[in-house]
Amino acid sequence: MAVRPQLQQEEVKDTKPQKPPLTGEERMKWIKLWEAEVKKSTMVNGVTKLTHKQIADEGDWLPKKPAPYPKTNEFAIQQRVFHAAYIEANFDPQSGAKLLTWKEEEIWLKENEFELMELWEEKKKLIF
């Protein structure tokens, strides 16, 4: 029968000699010395107490909310949709070159006003 090897654990012994706890007059001497050092030091308070005025000015304990992001109005969205439709109808999607049927944007918008309004009604349902 084979014997399985086992790890041997050694106890770690503190090599420093330990002093016996202080008692009686020697203990009181050290306590008084410590107390004198504590009284001599100045305590620093890291957090100052806020006044009621400061709390009111700063908006209580929670930080003030940022201003809301401005909402894009409906007219600006409509103009972007119309411009995207113009680009799609008058320029090649791969090269970006003008198509043979290219027209100025203002003219194209006037000629396709009815189709654009139908497109806008469809997009408006998705957006709003």
Image (cartoon, rainbow, N blue to C red):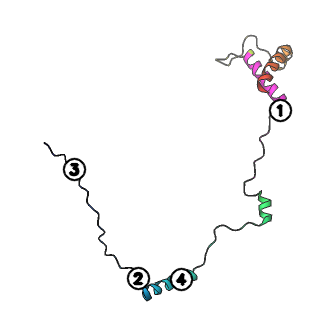
The residue most toward the front is 1
Choose the circle earlier in sequence order: 4 or 1. 4
Which label lies toward us, 3 or 1? 3
Q: Residue at x 43, y 87 (%)?
A: 24
Residue 35 vs residue 63, the one in the foreground? 35
CA gap, disc 1 and disc 2: 80 Å
> In the drawing, what numbered circle is on residue 73?
1
Which residue in the protein does label 3 denote? 6
Percent of width and height locating residue 63: 72, 54
Which residue in the protein does label 4 denote? 35
Looking at the rendering, in which quadrant would you find the N terminus? top left
Magenta span includes 73: yes
Choose the circle earlier in sequence order: 4 or 2. 2
Choose the circle earlier in sequence order: 1 or 2. 2
Which residue in the protein does label 2 denote? 22
Specify few, some or many for label 1: CA neighbours under 10 Å numbering under 14, 14-19, or 20 or more. Answer: few
Choose the circle earlier in sequence order: 2 or 3. 3
Q: Which residues are magenta?
A: 63-88
> Label 1 amino acid?
Asn
